[in-house]
Amino acid sequence: MTNQTSQCSIEKTLKQISGKWKSVIIYMLLKHPVCRFSELQRFIPDCSRRMLALQLKELEQDGLITKKVYPVTPPKTEYSLTERGKDLRTVVEGMQEWGKH
Amino acid sequence: MTNQTSQCSIEKTLKQISGKWKSVIIYMLLKHPVCRFSELQRFIPDCSRRMLALQLKELEQDGLITKKVYPVTPPKTEYSLTERGKDLRTVVEGMQEWGKH
DNA sequence: CTGGATCCTCAACGATACTG
DNA sequence: CAGTATCGTTGAGGATCCAG
């Protein structure tokens, strides 16, 4: 009766951060706790506007980031990490360090 | 002249571990340092044989794992992490912890 | 400025069968 | 036992245009 069942939660984590830009977005929000959409665009120039919006929406739906919309013209939004999102610091910074080689 | 260029190595890390089962394989090899192909199959039952072989091959090509083949019949192989692979411990275990919620 | 809607492509992945 | 070969599907992501 050993609990040899894979006992692996990695798959769930992967589902939430495996988007092409999600972990980068989280990383940027760790370094810059409050970001406008256009700021994130500048921080991640290789990510298209469409993809940025898409990944931000998914991250928000998964409860990793919060979106604050100011009802002004032109529109202004601010993104920041939830606590749950901040908890990914270890993972995301680990990826950054490892990638530096 | 602030080094505002994204300075982000995460994308490279992502390229190497973003396969559907790669991080799980690494996790299993952290817990079981030497594994045969069939052992990994048992540890990760949701991963098909084809995918397992594929991801193992890519991990090997990227220098994250080592494959040892015994020239016997029937064939016997053993997989283990390289140092580079072991360096992912922080990331992979972080994913596991975070996923546990 | 911050998105959404549409269309399209390609590579990741699954299912199945075969092999030394 | 430890893979490879082949075929088919799907959905993530790119390009472009539209909108409040």
Image (cartoon, coloured by chain):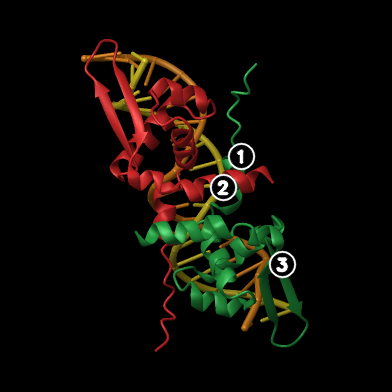
Chain colours: A green, B red, C orange, D yellow
SS under mark 1: loop
Q: CA distance from mark 2 to mark 3?
A: 21 Å
Q: Is residue A41 rendered to the left or right of residue A62?
A: left
The mark total stands at 3
Which marked residue is nearer to the observer: mark 2 or mark 3? 2
SS under mark 2: helix
Q: Which residue is mark 3?
A: A66
Mark 1 residue type: Ser
Q: Residues within 10 Å of mark 2 (few under 14, many from 20)?
A: many
Q: Is residue A58 rendered to the left or right of residue C8?
A: right
Expressed as whole percent of the image width and height from the top left, the position of residue B60 reads 31, 39
Residue nearest the viewer, comparing A72 with B48: B48
SS under mark 3: strand
Mark 3 residue type: Thr
In this rendering, does residue B69 appear at all?
yes
Q: CA distance from mark 1 to mark 3?
A: 24 Å
Mark 2 residue type: Met
Q: Residue at x 68, y 76 (%)?
A: A78
Q: Which residue is mark 1?
A: A9
